[in-house]
Amino acid sequence: MASVIRVSRSIVGPNEADAVSRVLLEDGYLGMGSEVLSFERELAAFLSIDASKVCCVNSGTAALHLAVEASVDAGDEVLVQSLTFISSFQAISAARAVPVACEVRSGSATIDLEDAARRLTSRTRAIMPVHYASYPHDLEAVYAFAATHKLRVIEDAAHAFGTQHQGKYIGHQGDIVCFSFDGIKNITCGEGGAIVSHDVDVLARVRDARLLGIEKDSDKRYRGQRSWDFQASKQGYRYHMSNIMAAIGRVQLRRLPTEFGPHRVNLARRYRENLAREAQIRFLETSLAEVIPHIQPILVSNGKRDLVRDALQHDGIETGIHYKPNHLLKLYGEGSERLPITEQMYGELLSLPLHPGVTTEHVDGVCVVVQRTLNQQSSVAS
Ligand SMILES: *Cc1c(COP(=O)(O)O)cnc(C)c1O
């Protein structure tokens, strides 16, 4: 019996282990220190931006939370697609702002700006586009919408580290861009995240807020020191990244362009080639010349998603459903408002295994099961 093929995972190896043991055994400074500074500099170099624009934290959710808190006030409304990880919504409500659930475009699972426009109120202050499956679709339109309505833009780029848009990396420009380096993302720190901004006020806020609001402590931490006589004037959190996490991330960052990126793209192409002629399956729009896909969603029509899911499960192939729409959760209205496109997609979405441990042979095997299941059903039905 073959082992289970997982839907998502990151690949860490001896180089990451060596980097961690160097921090543990040689450096001995485990918290936020020089390793974090190095990681921030290397992320900035990767994105071709100044190192001062990158602020590492201990999760993608923490990045989003600090980004929202730095850019809107309590009670302000933030437009966000319902079809996203609960993290996007929790980050907004944690900042005591109000997430306003919007529809997605069915073609790309990115925010539907026409729907978002109908939800504007006098309290709307920001929009949070989610680069679903790493594809930002028409990001210029989001920024134009924000400019028209005087909104901040907080990009949830948790899926999209390493992805390019019109020749530039996500994070190279924009207002505030948040990445996740959790255990299954395009690169991992174990857990981790980063805020990238081009606004010096936001940067100053999030740098202090990640260290319990202690003002201007980051530079001391990078040198292995800390402030004893300090000032704090705003709420902060224990959200800084540790040297251990940064050491893992630095190795992963080097592996992304040569190893993980091309591998993920190859697998995504293979899925599309194999299933291109399957009428009951739809793929989302993407641009594999620029995107490093974090997940591989397909949409299965005719109510057959769960059938396909069960058949794959039976053959030891794990799948996912990205995501349960947030407007259906108790915390966010429990479906008191209907979002028909989002709900329809929720019934059809199925994420197939995609990570650097998956091979093209695995992909072929997965596709055989998918096609067999769909065609068996149609012959029974006919
Ligand atoms: C992973 C993820 C996050 C949160 O990142 P964590 O590092 O897990 O906290 C936020 N939004 C989306 C869309 C994600 O996939």
Image: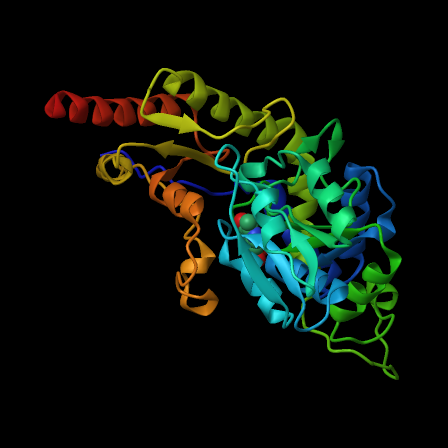
11 horizontally vs 208: left or right: left
Using the image as rendered, state which of residue 305 and residue 2 is in the foreground.
305
The percent position of residue 184, horizontal first and vertical second, equals: 51, 46
Using the image as rendered, state which of residue 19 and residue 250 is in the foreground.
250
330 horizontally vs 223: left or right: left
Using the image as rendered, state which of residue 72 and residue 350 is in the foreground.
72
Residue at 74%, 43% in the rendered image: 143
Looking at the picture, the colour scheme in use is: rainbow
Residue at 45%, 42% in the rendered image: 8
Using the image as rendered, state which of residue 25 and residue 3 is in the foreground.
3
Residue at 41%, 47% in the rendered image: 340
Can residue 181 be seen here?
no
Quadrant location of the C terminus in the rendered image: top left
Quadrant location of the N terminus in the rendered image: top left
Residue at 28%, 38% in the rendered image: 309
Can residue 365 be seen here?
yes
314 horizontally vs 338: left or right: left
